[in-house]
């Protein structure tokens, strides 16, 4: 990846990742979790800020001025997760409208980089379809090409 | 220990260190001890409902 991202730590089972966002509001610990869904090999991506007591909040607006670097880091983490478990798929869903839009803008802008050996789907008008820049999506699925 | 053996031992250590983690990623055994946050579980329940209704891409 040609863009900057934060170094991160990973749990031995490759399901929990953490990194530190450094910006205008200081240093904020972020956690990315891949949680198993009812479907085999399908994981839901959770993202949140960790406070001093270890509690995770996924609705906090950090506003740390490093959005792009944070998104690049999540991108790297997803790549590592899929590299580790080649059959895995990742569901990404922003929990607010602005986050959904942010994910869509990021994927659109980095589509050529993301879709090397990966395929991205978006859910639009009641059906899954291959990601297209012009369409609106509120949930995404990323997996290795079959 | 002759120089060759010293170098071999040195290289072995380097390989060990590199395979333990890359420059941007390191393994933290402590992260496994964290309980999955409730907020992540709640969101995943919603995703399960969604997947049950709409399935996965072909």
Image (tube, rainbow, N blue to C red):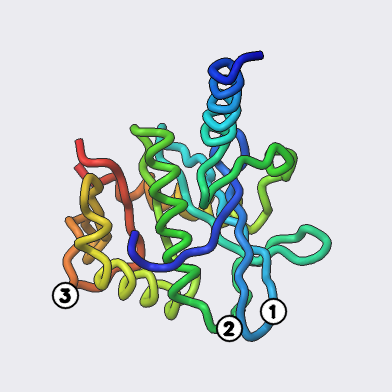
Q: Nearer the viewer, residue A64 or B37?
A: A64
Residue found 69% across the figure and 61% down from its top: A56
Neighbor class of circle 3 (other Cα within 10 Å; few <14, some 14-19, many 20+) is few
- Label whose residue precedes the other's in the sequence (3 or 2): 2
B40 up-or-down from A104: above or below: above
Location of residue A74 in the rendering, given as x and y in whole percent from the top left corner: 46, 59
Residue found 35% across the figure and 61% down from its top: A139
3D distance between C-alphas at marks 3 and 2: 27 Å
In the image as oriented, which residue stretches furthest toward the front?
B2
3D distance between C-alphas at marks 1 and 2: 10 Å
Which of the 4 quarters of the picture holds residue A115?
Answer: bottom left
Q: Is residue B3 left or right of residue B37?
A: left
Q: Is residue A127 left or right of residue A68?
A: left
- Badge 1 and badge 2 both on one subunit: yes
Q: Give the label, 3 or 2, closer to the camera.
A: 2
Labels 3 & 2 near each other (Cβ < 8 A): no
Disc 2 designates what residue?
A63
**Of helix, strand and loop, which one carries label 3?**
loop
Disc 2: which chain? Answer: A
Q: Quadrant of the N terminus of chain A?
A: bottom left
- Label whose residue precedes the other's in the sequence (3 or 1): 1
A61 up-or-down from B44: above or below: below
Residue found 73% across the figure and 45% down from its top: B34
- Label whose residue precedes the other's in the sequence (1 or 2): 1
A103 up-or-down from B53: above or below: below
Location of residue B42 in the rendering, given as x and y in whole percent from the top left corner: 59, 55
Location of residue A24 in the rendering, given as x and y in whole percent from the top left corner: 63, 85
Location of residue B4 in the rendering, given as x and y in whole percent from the top left corner: 54, 18
Disc 1 designates what residue?
A26
Q: Is residue A76 left or right of residue A13?
A: left
Disc 3 designates what residue?
A134
């Amino acid at each position: 990846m040609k863009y900057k991202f934060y170094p991160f730590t990973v749990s031995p089972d490759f399901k929990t990742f953490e990194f530190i966002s450094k910006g205008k509001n200081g240093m904020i610990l972020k956690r990315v979790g891949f949680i198993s869904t009812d479907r085999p090999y399908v994981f839901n991506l959770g993202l949140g800020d960790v406070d001093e007591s270890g509690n995770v909040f996924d609705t906090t607006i950090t506003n740390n001025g490093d959005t792009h670097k944070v998104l690049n880091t999540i991108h790297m983490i997803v790549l590592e997760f899929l590299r580790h478990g080649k059959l895995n798929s990742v569901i990404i869903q922003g929990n607010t409208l602005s986050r959904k839009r942010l994910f869509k803008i990021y994927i659109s802008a980095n589509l050529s980089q993301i879709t090397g050996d990966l395929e991205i789907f978006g859910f639009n008008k009641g059906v899954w379809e291959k990601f297209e820049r012009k369409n609106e999506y509120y949930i995404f699925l990323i997996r290795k090409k079959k | 220990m002759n120089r060759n053996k010293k170098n071999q031992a040195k290289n072995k250590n380097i390989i060990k260190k590199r395979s333990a983690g890359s420059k941007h990623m390191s393994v933290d055994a402590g992260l496994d001890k964290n309980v999955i946050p409730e907020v992540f579980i709640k969101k995943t329940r919603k995703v399960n409902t969604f997947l049950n209704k709409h399935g996965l891409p072909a």
